[in-house]
Amino acid sequence: MAFVVTLGTASASADVAVEVFTFTGECTDCSGTGTGTLILLAGYDLGTALSADDLYSFNYSSNLTDISIHNDPTEVLSGTLPVGLGPANIFISGDSGTVTFSSSSDGTWSALNPPADYGTSGIWTAGYPTPTPEPSALPVIGIALAGAVFLRRRRVQAA
């Protein structure tokens, strides 16, 4: 499933079509689960090899560590997301290899920032992002409201 993400500021923006996949695995060294969101540029076909050219961003979080890889010239993405998804051999790294995430077809996985997370029962699913407003839109709305108040006061004073 492809989605469109808007990038840029209020004065200039660009739409980028993306596909979203989520990872969930049971932590062995942390409590609860580790979760990740892999956003690929649209056009990736399940069952084919992944490359850094497919990667838009990857974010991982647990109670021990957080990882974010986005727009990193040293990023690496390899492996294959299987048709039907589930466990998968995936390797993602950024920050010249010091930040890594990997999952295996047997469900084991690890995330290194450091500290490291590792666990079992890791599965990939097709994700569906929650729409959120672009952060730069809020200042634009504030400036527009302030301008309206200013113009109103100016008209009242002129009368």
Image: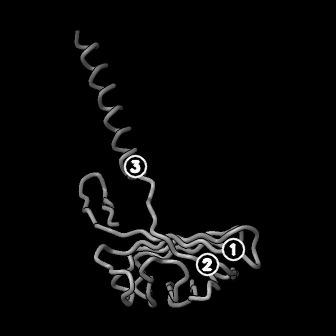
Which type of secondary structure does the marked residue at label 2 adopt? strand
Bin the neighbour count of mark 3 within 10 Å (Cα to Cα): few under 14, some 14-19, many 20 and up: few
Give SS at disc 1.
Answer: strand
Chain-order first, disc 3 or disc 1 = 1
Question: Horizontal placement of 144 versus 39: left or right?
Answer: left
Residue 122, which numbered label?
2
Residue at 45%, 77% (x, y): give it. 84
Q: Residue at x 23, y 9 (%)?
A: 159
State the residue at coordinates (46%, 73%): 38
Q: Residues within 10 Å of mark 2 (few under 14, many from 20)?
A: many
- Of all residues, the one furthest to the front in this rendering is 84
On screen, residue 147 above or below 5 = above
Asked if the residue at tag 3 contacts the one at tag 2, i.e. Cβ–Cβ closer than 8 Å, the answer is no
**Position of residue 48 measured from the top left corner of the image (x, y, whole percent):** 36, 88
Which of discs 3 and 1 lies nearer the camera? The answer is 1
| C-alpha distance separating marks 2 and 3 | 30 Å
The residue type indicated by label 3 comes to: Pro
User: Residue 122: x, y in percent?
Assistant: 61, 78
Please state which amino acid type lies under the numbered disc 2. Answer: Gly
Mark toward the start of the polypeptide (1 vs 2): 1
Residue that badge 1 annotates: 26
Foreground tag (2 vs 3):
2
Amino acid bearing label 1: Glu
- Do callouts 3 and 1 mark residues in contact (Cβ within 8 Å)? no
Per the image, the residue denoted by label 3 is 133
Query: Is residue 100 depicted above or below 135 in this figure?
Result: below
Colour style of the rendered protein structure: one colour
